Image (tube, rainbow, N blue to C red):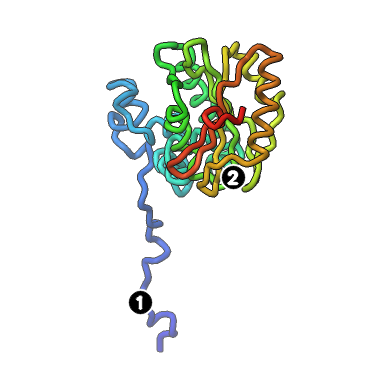
Amino acid sequence: MPKDDELAPESDEAEAPALRYHVRIREIPADERPRERLVKYGADTLSTAELLAILLRTGTEKYSALGLANHLLSTFGSLRGVANATIEEMSAIHGLGPAKAAQIKAAIEFGRRLVAASPEERPKIRSPRDVYNLLGPTLRDQNREHFVALLLDTKGGVLRTRTVSVGDLSSSLVHPREVFTEAVRHSAASLIVAHNHPSGDPAPSPEDVQVTRRLCEAGELLGIELLDHVVLGDSRWVSLKEKGLM
């Protein structure tokens, strides 16, 4: 009589290849790979994910470089979300790590400086609405207060956007030193500060008014005028300048 295990049908399970839904970069035809397409057709023809994939260079056992790039964009919601993510937040994604996160941060900062170096391309701030249009898409969905300084040239062009502090749900602790150090370093003619209220209500708090007045005093001493403090809410904003609170 044959043994029990001899009666069992042979299984191919051990030899079956692991199921994969993603394609590795090296498995894509050479002329369709992001780097080769960039060289042949130009960077402007590539998607955001493809550009990120070139920066990442390698993927993981789960994702190709392109798959990891798409996962990164999905995790942070958009390219702007990636740009605003910290090194620590990006490094928490498996397959990224501090080195790759630093490369992405460097590339984004390089782009920002390129725009800052071209006065005709700088966003212009002429009203509180311009502040909201520039910062609202980034800050309106944050669940913590982000205090941001817009450093301006003599024509109201944005030299640099600097996140000064990230507070808890009720406050942002801001010291004039942190605000004006960047303004002096970049030779800003003036600045505007702004922060979001996660509640969606942009009504200024007593602390908002107090911080604004301290910054105005510091600006007078340094010769860098604080033009306004704009509080951003849910599709709304309040200008402390318009309210006569500074």
Label 2: which secondary element: loop
Give the left or right position of residue 69, taking residue 218 as reference. left
Marks 1 and 2: which is nearer the front? 2
- Sort mark 2 into few (<14), some (14-19) or many (20+) by Cα contacts within 10 Å: many
Q: Is residue 86 positioned above or below 201 on the image?
A: above
**Residue hosting label 2:** 144
Lateral position of residue 210 relative to residue 35, left or right: right
Numbered tag placed on residue 9 in the rendering: 1
CA distance for labels 1 and 2:
61 Å
Q: Position of residue 55 (x, y in %)?
A: 46, 29
User: Measured along the vertical axis of the image, is residue 11 above or below residue 213?
Assistant: below
Q: Earlier in the sequence, mark 1 or mark 2?
A: 1
Quadrant housing the C terminus: top right
What residue is rendered at 43% in x and 30% in y? 129
Say which amino acid is labelled 2. Arg
The quarter of the image holding the N terminus is bottom left
| Residue at 67%, 32% in the rendered image | 211
Task: Name the amino acid, label 1.
Answer: Pro
